Image: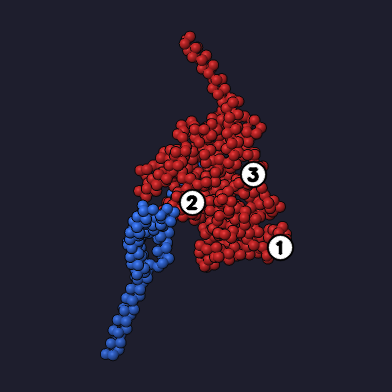
Amino acid sequence: MLKRFAGYTLTALNILALLIIFALGFKVFALPAIAERIYGDRYKELVFRCDDVMRAHLIAKNRVIVSPNAQNIQALHAAEVGLIDCQEYDILRKRLLSLGLTNNDLARLGLQAIQERDADVRAFVKVHEIKY
Amino acid sequence: MRLNTSIGVIFLALLPLSSAAMGPAIEQILRQQIMAGGFVRPEQVYQNPDQGLAKTGALLFKSTRLSLNGNISCQTCHLDQFNSADGLPNAAAVGGTGEGPPRMMSGAPLLPRRTLTLWGRGGREFEAFFWDGRVSYQRGKLVSQFGSRPPSQDLLVTADHLPVVEIREMLDDGDAFIAAHKQEAISSAQPVYRAIAHNLIVGEPAISYQIAVYFRKNVSQLTYTDFARALAAFIRSKFRLKETRLAQFVYDKKPLTDQELRGALVFYGKGNCIACHSGAYFSDFNYHVVAFPELGFGKNGFGIDYGRYNVTFNPNDLYKFRTPPLFNVARNRFYGHSGSVDSLQGAIVAHFDPLSLVDLQKMTSLQRNDFYKRLTLSQDTANRVGFLTQEDVQNVAAFLKTLSF
């Protein structure tokens, strides 16, 4: 009886261990990959949008420094409001981190977004290779 | 028959007239305009305070030890067969293999701008380096990232300090030492310069010894600036301006072809190219917006390059680039800061009809928006440069070839 109970317990523990391994595997490997597949493009889009408003804000700020007139000050206020676009980026960034993507993964996605037009250059060179 | 003969006679009679229109008087006017535009004989701008280091500098120019953790030298991207550049629209630097297009196709990470040629660098009155003039003279003062303490008062020597610490250019950021010093501060660059100097002392003992002898120092006392002076000596010597057909036309009264003369008339006349392409190097060393199409990811990412603004943070400098000098310009493979134009004629067209160089329907909304901004900011250029016909463009291109050597 005791032996049979021990056998059941061992089986249950094995199943539990297997489940934990699967769950961990899912969390560490599958979940980040799935999250990247689902949210990757959106993340890149938000990287651009946040970068765009941040650049616009810096330019607006510099315009006020160069010529502090009412029009430029108003434009700076508008650019400050524009920074709200970065909130969505921040939220998605945190969500992706909680889904298991690392800071390096996010940096890679960001770099891909920034350098997306890299491929155009290689294509351009390929077209003109005949000239060399 | 009689009518045809008459037309033929009139035509033949007019031919010499049209040649006469490009005759001695026009040539004389052109010579005056060319000299008034600042053109001088090449030897007048040559200077080389460290001439004695030029031969050593030639060896250093080829040394991959200049790259602290990569396999790249100055020569990798400044090749004779590509007019002292790399023959690519965007530079493909550290991490690649081969030269020119094979280097790009080898998967080398790209830099956002085209490699500049080296002609005339370091000569007298050459006042701004790089596309955005990040090393330049302003009101007689050297202005660079080094602030009030540049490594040298010599522009070229200071400029030689930048590529070696530029990540992706000659530095790979994939090691802990570089990652630890990856900050936009001069203080963080100093250990990197010390490491590069050490790398050269260890890896290039013969070169280091020659430089040490020149400066009367112990090899162990050499700094990166000493090596930079050797590089500058070589660059000045190897890429000095030489005699051109234009110089022979101006000073020795040698002829130019009819097409070249017509091109010169456009350049100094209705095209008003001389407004910016003036001085000894055909550059005013000032900054202007020309709405070239953008190729690649751009210095600011997403296909955007703010140009001079990235140096000054002055919004009035958005999209401005230094007027490029024109010696040997006809020998370039690509034109514009991002190499987006593949012919000299196209580069001329970019100054007065940039819309003809882009396919608006194929551009993304962001690309169109960025191009629109550049167009609106290029009004200064648009107002200066007159309308040119296709023939004018061909003639100007022919004229610019007289600046080759």
Mark linked to residue B191: none
Alpha carbons under labels 2 and 3: distance apart: 26 Å
- Label 2 belongs to which residue? B308
Q: Can marks 1 and 3 be said to lie on one chain?
A: yes
- Report the residue at 57% width, 59% height from top: B148
Q: Which chain is red?
A: B
Which callout, 1 or 3, points to the residue nearer the camera? 3
Q: Is residue B56 left or right of residue B372?
A: right
Circles 1 and 3, Cβ within 8 Å, touching? The answer is: no
Give the quarter of the figure containing the C terminus of chain B. Answer: top right
Identify the element where label 3 is drawn: loop
Q: Which chain is blue?
A: A
Name which residue type carries label 3: Val
Mark closest to the chain's N terminus, 2 or 1: 1
| Parent chain of label 3 | B
Query: Is there any visible trace of residue B156 in the rendered image?
Result: yes
**Camera-side residue: B226 or B84?**
B226
Mark closest to the chain's N terminus, 1 or 3: 3
- Report the residue at 64% width, 52% height from top: B232
Identify the element where label 1 is drawn: loop
